[in-house]
Image: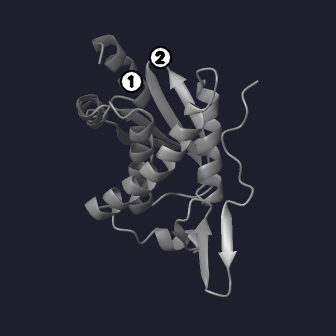
Amino acid sequence: MTQSAFDATGFFRFDLANGSIKSREGEQLALIPVDLLDGLEPGEQTKRSSMAFGKTHGKRFAEIIAQLEEPPGVEILADHLGGLTAVFGLGRSAVEIRGNAILFRLKSGREMSDGVVTLLTGFLAGFMSEIEPETTFEILHMQTDDDGDLFWAGNPKAIDQVKDWLADGVKPMEALWLLSEEGR
């Protein structure tokens, strides 16, 4: 049995005397209503900042898995990301593997604004880039349905192709199947 990669115990450290909250890694945090995130602009600044945030957490996760005696399965990634999105109050994420595709499903119980989608795609891209530094990841928000929001991690060329198919009306899972048929 694989040990959980995410331990929420002590994740937040409150320093009331100085009016600060820090993560156990020392990041300065703020607890704000999630509705305030809806005002985020879905532009490059949000993407860059959230990618840097994702890289910080991806680096920590890479350190955790580097200490394991056996190669980790996808469960440890799912557990860790699920824990992170939960402690940040963004919902509970799950990792799905479909053929060669790695998908992230986030169930938050609320509709995500474009700014929050940008925040999450940047965070996931930064996180994944620290786990697989030799691979360039982009994250595409593929759909929202009753099961939550679905994000896909792919290389930039594949992302562009899938975006084109989606714009042409191809369903998300069908687009990933077409991509696998092309061998990208």
Residue 99: mark:
2
Q: Is residue 57 visible?
A: yes
Placement of the N terminus among the 4 image quadrants? top right
SS type, badge 1: helix
- Which residue is nearer to you in this view: 77 or 183? 77
Contact between marks 1 and 2 (CB within 8 A): the answer is yes
Amino acid under disc 2:
Gly
Q: Is residue 120 visible?
A: no
Q: Position of residue 36 (x, y in %)?
A: 50, 74
In the depicted structure, whether residue 144 falls above or below residue 77: below
Amino acid under disc 1:
Leu
Q: Position of residue 107 (x, y in %)?
A: 61, 47
- Which residue is nearer to you in this view: 104 or 110? 104
Identified at 71% across, 48% down, the residue is 7
**Residue 78 falls in which quadrant of the image?**
top right
Q: Position of residue 162 (x, y in %)?
A: 30, 30
| Mark 1 or 2, nearer chain start | 2
Identified at 60% across, 23% down, the residue is 73
Mark whose residue sits in front, 1 or 2: 2
Placement of the C terminus among the 4 image quadrants? top left
Picture colour scheme: one colour
- Which residue is nearer to you in this view: 179 or 2? 2
Identified at 61% across, 86% down, the residue is 18
Disc 1 marks which residue?
176
Q: Is residue 101 left or right of residue 20?
A: left
- Which residue is nearer to you in this view: 98 or 124? 124
Q: Is residue 131 left or right of residue 168?
A: right
SS type, badge 2: loop
Q: Position of residue 121 (x, y in %)?
A: 40, 48
Number of other residues with Cα within 10 Å of mark 1, as a class: few under 14, some 14 to 19, many 20 or more: many
**Residue 168 falls in which quadrant of the image?**
top left
Identified at 31% across, 34% down, the residue is 166
